[in-house]
Amino acid sequence: MKKIKKIACIGAGYVGGPTMSVIAQKNVDVEVTVVDLNVARIAAWNDGDLNHLPVYEPGLDDVIKEARGRNLFFSTDVDKAIKEADMIFISVNTPTKTYGKGKGQAADLKFIELCARQIAAVATSDKIVVEKSTLPVRTAEALKSILDNTGNGVNFDILSNPEFLAEGTAVSDLHNPDRVLIGGEDAEAIEALVQVYEAWVPRERILTTNLWSSELSKLVANAFLAQRVSSINAISELCEVTGANVDEVARAIGQDSRIGSKFLKASVGFGGSCFQKDILNLVYIARSYNLTAVADYWEQVISLNDHQKSRFAEKIIQTMYNTVNGKQIAFLGWAFKKDTNDTRESAAIYVADHLLDEEATVIIYDPKVSAEQIYKDLDYLGTRSAEDNRRLVKVVESHHDAVKGAHAIAILTEWDEFKGYDWQQIKNGMKKPSFVFDGRKILNKKQLVNLGFDYYSIGE
Ligand code: UDX
Ligand code: ADP
């Protein structure tokens, strides 16, 4: 049995960076090199000031401090890392296609294919290639075919090892995973990867399956989680009209051990790089096998999520006397959830877009997201010109600057610090009536109402 000595990871993003950092932390005798084409990103991973890491994750700085320079390295020399490694993780992004067949649904595999071709061109010894990116089912087959047909005659074993970490809790999820999933055909290759994880994960939590089960399980896990959020969000709308309270309903049903209490928090809508993309993938695969009923069923999870986002924006407009034109609306939060600087598919983007269509002035404060990123997110939608986005949207560095003189406050991310603000002082500085729209249900309704706010929360 071959013991892995050197690991390379292609892609130093939200998945590759934290995952490899923990693998290196726990396997002192394995040299781990994370490579990326993005020079600025690699420079940031190597920055002496750990506040400048490209990915914000609680606890990640300590892991990096321990392993970086010891057996964890970040580099732009992709070829060298490939050549030297026994095991190569592919952890590049697989966004939804924005062109051609499957546009808006299928995963864009061009980055994966480029990686495979590069590995095939450079490798001069046998490699175990591990899919870490979320991929449509049977991608491993395509990967294998590229590697075998364009390579230098060396042997490639392909494994699927999907990532289940959630952003904002990546380090603790990696340290203490519910399970690690490894799919593959070759027993020795599987065992080599099992050994890497066994350095800290109990053997019974390491599941091995065939390749296709592993690839599909990742999509299905995310689809089930997203479905719970859409289910409770659907009920939130019903609560608003019937006088029930969605938190009370969630508590009541969550006590049933068959249902469970997690992932029942009604919100302005789910975001993140995975949920929507993975469901779209699932839907696309089902359609390509002519499974229309299956595709339609899962597609509803996304439709409901879109509905929840626009419903929240409409609620703001309606409540503010059917016009937000020229009114100042303060956004607290822009990230898709707390404790991350990631904004991919964040509900905030779509709520802002809706309000900007109505010519509102939106002032945004997020503790971890940069102004540059926020404008990029809005420009990417292509709804209006970049100039108009900059005319209507202001990004500020403190919550004081966002709420001062505002007609309304909208909570888009559940950052803990929002709860501790001096809401009396905020109220004093706002226009009257002072509206709060709590898209995350984090504030104390009684307290805010007592202070004289007009407080609206999802699902009550
Ligand atoms: C998810 C999966 O949890 C993870 O296993 C997978 O590897 C990647 O996708 P992530 O996208 O990082 O992780 O975040 P997650 O915590 O799952 O939240 C996704 C979205 O759902 C967020 O916008 C969150 O705010 C929202 N959400 C989650 C709710 O609105 N209510 C809930 O009860 C839970
Ligand atoms: P994820 O959330 O899946 O980690 P990210 O977008 O955060 O996605 O990270 C993916 C990284 O992969 C990016 O930093 C990108 O520059 C990198 N990448 C994409 N294609 C290649 C490639 N062929 N070689 C090296 N790095 C790549």
Image: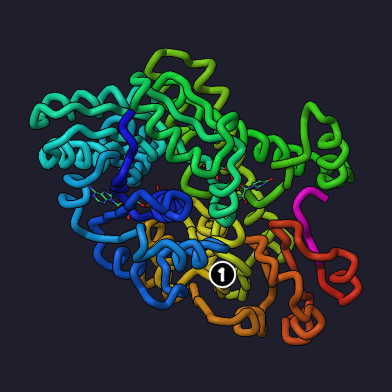
Camera-nearest residue between 140 and 203: 203
**Quadrant the N terminus occupies:** top left
Q: Is residue 96 visible?
A: yes
The residue to which callout 1 is attached is: 360
In percent of width and height, residue 33 lies at 30, 54
Q: Is residue 99 visible?
A: no
Camera-nearest residue between 124 and 409: 124
Residue at horizontal 25%, vertical 60%?
75
Asked which colour scheme the image uses, the reply is rainbow
Residue at horizontal 45%, vertical 33%?
194
Instruction: Report whether 357 appears left or right of 452.
Output: left
Residue 108: which quarter of the image? top left
Q: Where 108 falls versus 459 (above or below)?
A: above
In percent of width and height, residue 142 lies at 25, 25
Start-end of magenta stretch: 455-460
For label 1, the SS is loop
Q: For the view shown, which residue lies furthest in the top direction?
A: 290
